[in-house]
């Protein structure tokens, strides 16, 4: 796999009017942010504990409609040493209600990345928009037989137990049923390839996955470090509203109070270190820095490197 110049090769295809991949380097580590498209849950799920008038005012200030919010769906491919690592796998075909997503396979192919070259998969958590790409018909057969899938032990244990019948009531239907079904389908298909870890695991040189909890029992982030460069993929730990309103509960958070604490500590850390951040549901390619002002934060987009 080569990631050289994959952020701007030639012209886009006839159905691709905007870029869908963005390449950068973290020291000696190659990083490719890949868009799986856009999902559109109800906007209210971004702030279930906020006064509706305050929430609507926020959306108005951001030039956004108050009813439906477009969430980007970003995944990352990392190359470190002889390991090629896919972080999360997108929606796949798990939910027809999000027709603008589920494009990861096509976009990996367009970037010249063969699924057979992937040595490791890291799952930040097992919601269907993170595991669905591996459940698409024909994908499993294209993966190498020694593929390792890294996920927090607490995450796999939760979705494999009866505890998963108890999901947050803030999730809109039919999402809870979809989450249970896709997670159990994933475990049925890939249990033998799982490499569960407790709190932290180095997947490859400079690629460390760390459990945070909060959003789900085993939600994790992936930290990249090489030379003096750093970058963190935050999964679903932070959404766009989480900068200005880190205390707002997301409707998909299993433990919202815990998540707020984790989110604030995480954003304060990144503001102090000034290292860049990538997250699943920030606008593609989502590479940004965190600035802090008192109890709130600002997302400062990184300049695109042409």
Image: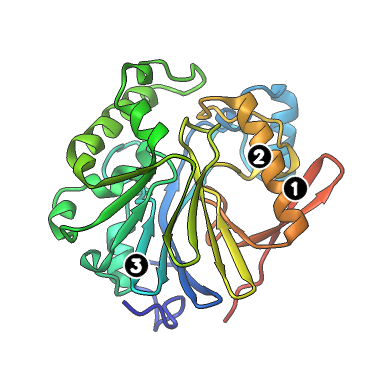
Residue 153 lies left or right of residue 224; in this view the side is left
Residue 34 lies left or right of residue 262; in this view the side is left
- Image x and y of residue 56, in percent: 69, 31
Q: Residue furthest right?
A: 294
Mark 3 Cα shell of 10 Å, populated few (<14), some (14-19), many (≥20): many
Secondary structure state at the residue bearing disc 1: helix
Q: What residue is at 28 percent from the left and 33 percent from the top?
A: 182
Of residue 306 and residue 12, the one placed in the foreground of this image is 306
Residue 198 numbered mark, or none? none
Quarter that holds the C terminus: bottom right
Residue 263 numbered mark, or none? 2
Of residue 72 and residue 67, the one placed in the foreground of this image is 72
Quarter that holds the N terminus: bottom left
- Image x and y of residue 193, in percent: 23, 47
- Image x and y of residue 217, in percent: 47, 30
Secondary structure state at the residue bearing disc 3: strand
Q: What residue is at 70 percent from the left and 47 percent from the top?
A: 267
Residue 23 lies left or right of residue 141; in this view the side is right
Circle 3 sits on which residue? Answer: 84
Of residue 240 and residue 147, the one placed in the foreground of this image is 147
Residue 191 lies in what quarter of the image? top left
Image position of 204 with respect to 226: above or below: above
Q: What residue is at 42 percent from the left and 71 percent from the top?
A: 80
Mark sitting earlier along the chain (3/1)? 3
Circle 1 sits on which residue? Answer: 268
Residue 116 lies in what quarter of the image? bottom left
- The Cα–Cα distance between marks 2 and 1, rounded to whole angstroms, is 9 Å
Secondary structure state at the residue bearing disc 2: helix
Mark 3–mark 2 CB contact (< 8 Å)? no
Image position of 250 with respect to 239: above or below: above
- The Cα–Cα distance between marks 3 and 1, rounded to whole angstroms, is 30 Å
Residue 129 lies in what quarter of the image? top left
């Amino acid at each position: 796999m080569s990631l050289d110049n994959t952020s701007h090769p030639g012209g886009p295809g006839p159905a691709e009017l905007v870029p869908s991949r963005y390449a950068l380097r973290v020291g000696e580590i190659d990083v490719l942010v890949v868009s799986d498209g856009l999902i559109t849950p109800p906007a209210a799920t971004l702030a279930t504990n906020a006064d509706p008038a305050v929430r609507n005012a926020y959306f108005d200030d951001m030039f956004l409609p108050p009813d439906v919010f477009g969430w980007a769906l970003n995944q990352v491919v990392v190359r470190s040493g002889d390991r090629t690592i896919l972080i999360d796998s997108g929606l796949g075909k798990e939910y027809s209600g999000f027709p603008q997503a589920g494009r990861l396979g096509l976009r990996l192919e367009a970037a010249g990345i063969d699924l057979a070259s992937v040595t490791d998969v890291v799952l930040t958590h097992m919601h269907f928009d993170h595991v669905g790409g591996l459940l698409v018909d024909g994908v499993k057969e294209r993966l190498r037989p020694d593929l390792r899938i890294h996920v927090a032990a607490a995450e796999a244990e939760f979705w494999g137990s009866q505890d998963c019948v108890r999901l947050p009531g803030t999730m809109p239907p039919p999402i809870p049923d979809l989450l249970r079904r896709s997670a159990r389908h994933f475990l049925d298909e890939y249990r033998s390839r799982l490499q569960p870890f407790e709190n932290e695991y180095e997947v490859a040189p400079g690629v460390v996955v760390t459990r945070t909890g909060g959003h789900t029992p085993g939600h994790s982030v992936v930290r990249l470090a090489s030379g003096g460069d750093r970058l963190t993929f935050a999964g679903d730990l932070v959404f766009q509203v989480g900068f200005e309103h880190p205390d707002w509960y997301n409707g998909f958070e299993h433990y919202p109070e815990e998540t707020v604490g984790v989110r604030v500590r995480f954003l304060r850390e990144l503001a102090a270190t000034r290292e860049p951040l990538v997250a699943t549901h920030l606008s593609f390619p989502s590479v940004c820095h965190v600035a802090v002002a008192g109890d709130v934060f600002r997302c400062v987009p990184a300049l695109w490197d042409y």
